[in-house]
Every structure is written in structure tokens, then in C-alpha cells.
Image (cartoon, rainbow, N blue to C red):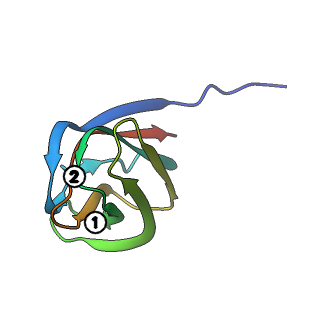
Amino acid sequence: MSSVMRNAYTAVIARGESWQGSVQTEPYEAAWAVEAVFFVRVLEASGSGTAVAKVQISPDGMHWADEGGELSIQAEAGHLSFGRVANFGGWLRLSVLVPPPTAVTVVATLALKA
């Protein structure tokens, strides 16, 4: 019986960024990974709305399609949301819509496993 250690990597895709209106995270190339989990933690918030982050995929890091997964991000300091995705091809990012007058300052990470 052999055991295989899986490769794992965590990338910070937004650190201390203030999100208002329509925002997209930096794209991340992850073609080597089999599964991914997006995490978004709210550091500070103003307003009381709920932001919606859509998982997007891309073959080249320039042209994007909605994957179907969504994260609800509450405008509340300390709120943590996550979304899982698999079979995504080469590139990943979040496309976020924060309703006015809400703003959130966040840390967003992408945990990848092969």
C-alpha cells in the first residue's frame, strides 16, 4: 500500500482591499490543481448590504465566464465566506458586486490542491 502526499498551495488574491461597486480579483493560474476553495474574510465594513462574489474561470486569464459558484459576503467585520470549485481549467478569479452604499475591506485567499 502506498500513500501519496497531495500538493497544496494557498495564494492571497486580495489583501486589505476595499471593495465597492463592481470589483474583480487578480486572476490566478491554477491549471495544475484539481480543486480550489476561495475564502473571503471581511476586515472592516460600512453599510449593511450583502456582496455577491461569482467564481469565474478562463482558458487564458483574459476572457472570463461565470463558473456558477457564488459566495455571499456579509458587510460585517469578521465574516468569513467560502466557495469550492473543481474542474475549472486554467485560471480562476472572483467577480464581486457590492451594493451601494456598502463597502468591505477584505482578505481573499485561494487554497489549491492537486
Q: Quadrant of residue 99?
A: bottom left
Name the spot of residue 53 as percent of width and height, x first: 33, 61
Disc 2 on helix, strand or loop? loop
Q: Which residue is mark 1?
A: 59
| Residue receiving disc 2 | 27
Quadrant in the picture for residue 65: bottom left
Give whichever of 82, 72 is nearer the camera: 72
At 24% from the left edge and 44% from the top edge, which residue is drawn? 45
Query: Residue 95 appears in which quarter of the rendering?
Result: bottom left
Q: What amino acid does circle 1 point to? A: Pro
Please tell me which residue is depicted at 14% across the width and 57% down the height of the picture.
20
Asked if residue 114 lies left or right of residue 39, the reply is: right
Of the image marks 2 and 1, the number of the one nearer the N terminus: 2
Q: Residues within 10 Å of mark 2 (few under 14, many from 20)?
A: some
Asked whether, in this view, residue 82 is left or right of residue 95, the answer is right
Give the crowd class for mark 1: few <14, some 14-19, many >=20 residues within 10 Å.
Answer: some
- Of 70 and 100, nearer the camera is 100
Could you say which is closer to the camera, residue 9 or residue 59?
9
Alpha carbon separation for disc pair 2 and 1: 11 Å
Query: Outermost residue, front direction?
Result: 47
What residue is shown at x 41% (from left), y 31% (from top)?
Answer: 9
Mark 2 or 1: the one toward you: 2
Say the numbered circle drawn on residue 31.
Answer: none
Q: Which residue is pictured at 16% across the width and 60% down the height?
A: 23
**Observer-nearest of 26 and 63:** 26
Seen in the picture, residue 108 relative to 25 is either above or below; the reply is above
Residue 104, x across and y down, in percent = 22, 47
Is 53 placed left or right of 27 in the picture? right
- Point out the residue furthest to the right here: 1
